Every structure is written in C-alpha cells, then in structure tokens.
Amino acid sequence: MISAIVPTLNAARDLHLLLSALVPAAADGLVRQVLVVDGGSSDGTLELCEDAGADVLTTTLADAVAGARGEWVLVLPVNLRLRRGWGEAVAAHLERGGQAALLTEGVDQGGWLARLRTPARAGVLLRRSAAAALGSTADLDALRRLAGRAPRLS
C-alpha cells in the first residue's frame, strides 16, 4: 500500500529510530517497502538498512519515487520521531478516502500561526503519481509544497 522513502546522509542513529518505528506498520501490511536514499554514508547506514530489510538507493529522491511500488509514498525526514499509533492514524486516513497529508510528531504548541507553518520535521503522504509529477525537482520541501494545506496526522 505505502512505500516509505527516507532521504538521509550520515544519520545512522536517527535512521535506526525511524526504521524501528516503521516495523509495526510493515508487520500490519501498511508499509510494503522502505527505500532509503543515501548519498554514500560511511556511518553504518548501509548495514543498518540491510539488517532492517530496507533498500538503499544512492540516487535521488525522484528516482526513489519512480521506483516505489506502493500507490502511496510516505516521505519522511530521517529525524522525524513517529508517535505510537501513527500507522493506525494513516490507515484510518486512507480508509476515509485519503488525500495528501502531513505526518508530524504531534500537535504544535506555538499557537495558530505556528499551526499554519509546516514543521521542519514533517513527513508527507502523497499518491505516487502526484509525487512523480515533480520529476527531477522532487525534494522533501517540494513535496510538502505540493501537499499544500493538507491535514496533519500524528
């Protein structure tokens, strides 16, 4: 159903935490593929991905989107801390008809103005076809802009 894509470089510690949070969703069948886009880390990232069953691409985010097998892509910054229950929130969102969504660490505490801004550590859930339309210009910020004022899931 979902291909999770994680762009990273020399962030094995953060990647370990994120991959651990993806495991329950993979076991439940929500996440069917994990792609790590890495520019050539020397910190154990490749070994970590191999142990976790994630595929490593040393190309671009756009190439990862093109190679995604899921109908949906979930692009996650490596330092995002997924909350317990995030998979259920995403599954429920998709069951209700799904649309683009931002996946955040929780509710922003900065007032209404802060809630209008996309948090720096927000992931984005998009249909693969919408993400692929960006072509070679796809990066996490461009995908967030494409999602616009999508609902936030945490």
Image (cartoon, grey):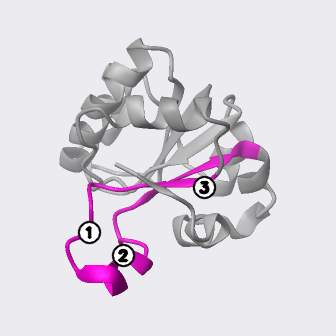
Whether residue 118 is in magenta: the answer is yes
Which residue position is annotated with label 3? 61
* Quadrant in the picture for residue 27: top left
Q: Amino acid at mark 1?
A: Asp
Number of residues whose C-alpha sits closer than 10 Å to that of mark 3, classed few (under 14), some (14–19) or many (20 or more): many
Q: Nearer the viewer, mark 3 or mark 1?
A: 1
At x 43%, y 20%, the residue is 26
Q: Which residues are magenta?
A: 100-128
Q: Secondary structure beneath disc 1?
A: loop
- Spatial CA span between label 1 and label 2: 6 Å
Q: Are marks 3 and 1 in contact (CB under 8 Å)?
A: no
Q: Are marks 1 and 2 in contact (CB under 8 Å)?
A: yes
Horizontal placement of 62 versus 90: left or right?
Answer: right
Which residue position is annotated with label 1? 108
- Spatial CA span between label 3 and label 2: 27 Å
Whether residue 45 is in magenta: the answer is no
Quick one: label 1 or label 2, which is nearer the N terminus?
A: 1
Q: Secondary structure beneath disc 2?
A: helix
Horizontal placement of 8 versus 82: left or right?
Answer: right
Which residue position is annotated with label 2? 115
* Quadrant in the picture for residue 111: bottom left
Would residue 44 be visible to someone looking at this image?
no
Q: Nearer the viewer, mark 3 or mark 2?
A: 2
* Quadrant in the picture for residue 128: top right
Horizontal and vertical percent for residue 50?
38, 24
Horizontal and vertical percent for residue 141?
54, 72
Q: Amino acid at mark 2?
A: Arg
